[in-house]
Image: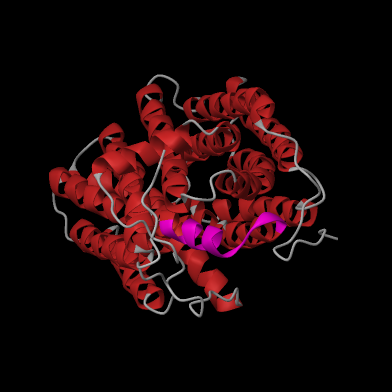
């Protein structure tokens, strides 16, 4: 594909607009990456309360999660090309504005239709943060340095699904489920304020963008086999995580009888696993090839999925068993996710926004599919629906990585941005 890059007479972003990887910048990029994930997970403890207040069943409530994930997935296909054409900051502000509007609308919703519409708008806005934050990192870093920064962001990002259910449980227990969305609105406003301070990192924006050019960019990314070798496993494991978040509230709150607040206590325990896995991945970056690190992560995730499914299939369901299995599962995720994301984006250096958007689309599409599948299976398999979907998604990720290893060219010794060998 031939894309329109700036000519000699086209102004580019000055080299002085440099993003320095300070702690504040890394936290901000991680927050932008995790804002959509937070909006999805903080809502989990509120699901039974939403069903009671709106007089709807759990499958209908789960659709308010699915529509958010679907909008989240497809919106990323727009933000990637827009950020390659107009720079990173303007599309980011547009998305954060939509997220803010959708959050306020959800907080004020009094019917299922109103809530579905608000969640749709919220999801359309949420796609901007994850796509553009990743593209900003890819604009700025390369090689092992990219992998390390991506791992740091991923480790901070891991706090989002861990602690957001706890925050959601506290808010639901004190002020009701609408308070969850008011919190989302406040965080969206804070993210907008922080994003205004980011420099523009797309120094070579495209001179024009049409639907045809955007489609050609996505075709180029979708045909890039080294990219797909890592992007497909990274997407499928998000399906596994989404299956847990879709099915666990019904099992633990409705089935085991724990309170929404107590439910919020268990996901933070799994954070220890992600931190362990992410720390190992950060140490191995530049020493082991990405394929080897990702493969190790998938083996650990498979062990966690088996630990989740087998006791449940035998009739044993307990909150501590579920929590322990998630610690193991998420440890593997900490190894695989930052490694696979960095490797995938490195395979498409010229279209960072488009590559990030397509990766985000694949991840959220897998998450939406897993959520819908759990909602369809749970009436028939109340306890084993989400562990079964987790096992299937993890197994498919392993198959994708196994086939993808043949698409990855041999890499030279990893180097840093100055061209010297990584120690």
Question: What segment is highlighted magenta in the picture?
Answer: 132-144
Quarter of the image that includes the C terminus:
bottom right
Front-most of residues 273 and 332: 332
Image quadrant in which you'd find residue 303: top right
Q: Position of residue 2 (x, y in %)?
A: 40, 42
Q: Is residue 385 left or right of residue 21?
A: left
Q: Position of residue 382 (x, y in %)?
A: 44, 26
Image quadrant in which you'd find residue 55: top left
Quarter of the image that includes the N terminus:
top left
Q: Position of residue 309 (x, y in %)?
A: 61, 26
Q: Is residue 247 visible?
A: no
Image quadrant in which you'd find residue 319: top right
Front-most of residues 121 and 7: 7
Which residue is drawn at the image coordinates 64% and 62% (left, top)?
A: 149
Q: Position of residue 133 (x, y in %)?
A: 46, 61
Which residue is drawn at the image coordinates 51% and 76% (left, top)?
A: 15
Is most of the magenta stretch helix, strand or loop?
Answer: helix
Above or below for 17 versus 387: below
Front-most of residues 309 and 230: 230
Q: Is residue 281 left or right of residue 40?
A: right
Q: Is residue 118 left or right of residue 422?
A: left
Q: Residue furthest right?
A: 423
Above or below for 317 versus 350: above
Above or below for 398 versus 274: above
Which residue is drawn at the image coordinates 55% and 48% (left, top)?
A: 345
Which residue is drawn at the image coordinates 35% and 24% (left, top)?
A: 376
Q: Is residue 67 visible?
A: yes
Front-most of residues 79 and 364: 79
């Amino acid at each position: 594909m031939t894309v329109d890059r700036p000519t000699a007479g086209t102004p580019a972003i000055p080299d002085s607009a440099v993003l320095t990887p300070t702690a504040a910048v890394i936290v901000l990029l991680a927050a932008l990456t995790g804002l959509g994930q937070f909006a999805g997970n903080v809502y989990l403890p509120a699901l039974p309360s939403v069903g009671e207040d709106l007089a709807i069943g759990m499958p209908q409530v789960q659709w308010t999660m699915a529509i958010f994930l679907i909008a989240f997935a497809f919106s990323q296909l727009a933000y990637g090309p827009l950020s390659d054409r107009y720079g990173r900051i303007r599309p980011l502000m547009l998305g954060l504005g939509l997220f803010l509007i959708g959050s306020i609308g959800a907080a004020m919703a009094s019917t299922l239709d109103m809530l579905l519409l608000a969640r749709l708008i919220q999801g359309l806005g949420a796609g901007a943060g994850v796509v553009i934050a990743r593209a900003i990192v890819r604009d700025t870093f390369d090689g092992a340095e990219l992998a390390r920064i991506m791992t740091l962001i991923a480790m901070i990002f891991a706090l989002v699904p861990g602690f957001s259910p706890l925050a959601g449980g506290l808010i639901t227990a004190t002020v009701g489920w609408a308070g969850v969305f008011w919190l989302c609105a406040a965080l969206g406003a804070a993210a907008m304020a922080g994003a205004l301070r980011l420099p523009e990192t797309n120094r070579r924006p495209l001179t024009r963008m049409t639907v045809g050019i955007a489609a050609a960019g996505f075709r180029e990314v979708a045909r890039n086999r080294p990219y797909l070798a890592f992007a497909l496993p990274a997407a499928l494991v998000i399906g596994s995580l989404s299956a847990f978040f879709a099915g666990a509230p019904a099992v633990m709150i409705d089935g085991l009888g724990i309170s929404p607040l107590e439910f919020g206590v268990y996901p933070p325990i799994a954070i220890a696993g992600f931190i362990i896995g992410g720390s190992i991945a950060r140490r191995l970056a530049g020493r082991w090839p990405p394929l080897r690190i990702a493969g190790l992560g998938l083996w650990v995730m498979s062990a966690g999925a088996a630990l989740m499914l087998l006791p449940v299939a035998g009739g044993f369901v307990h909150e501590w068993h579920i929590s322990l299995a998630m610690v193991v599962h998420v440890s593997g995720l900490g190894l695989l996710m930052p490694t696979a994301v960095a490797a995938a984006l490195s395979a498409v250096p010229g279209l960072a926004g488009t590559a990030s958007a397509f990766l985000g689309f694949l991840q959220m599409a897998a998450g939406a599919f897993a959520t819908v599948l759990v909602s369809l299976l749970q009436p028939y398999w109340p306890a084993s629906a989400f562990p079964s979907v987790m096992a299937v998604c993890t197994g498919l990720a392993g198959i994708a990585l196994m086939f993808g290893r043949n698409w990855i060219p041999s890499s030279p010794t990893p180097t840093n941005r100055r061209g010297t060998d990584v120690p």
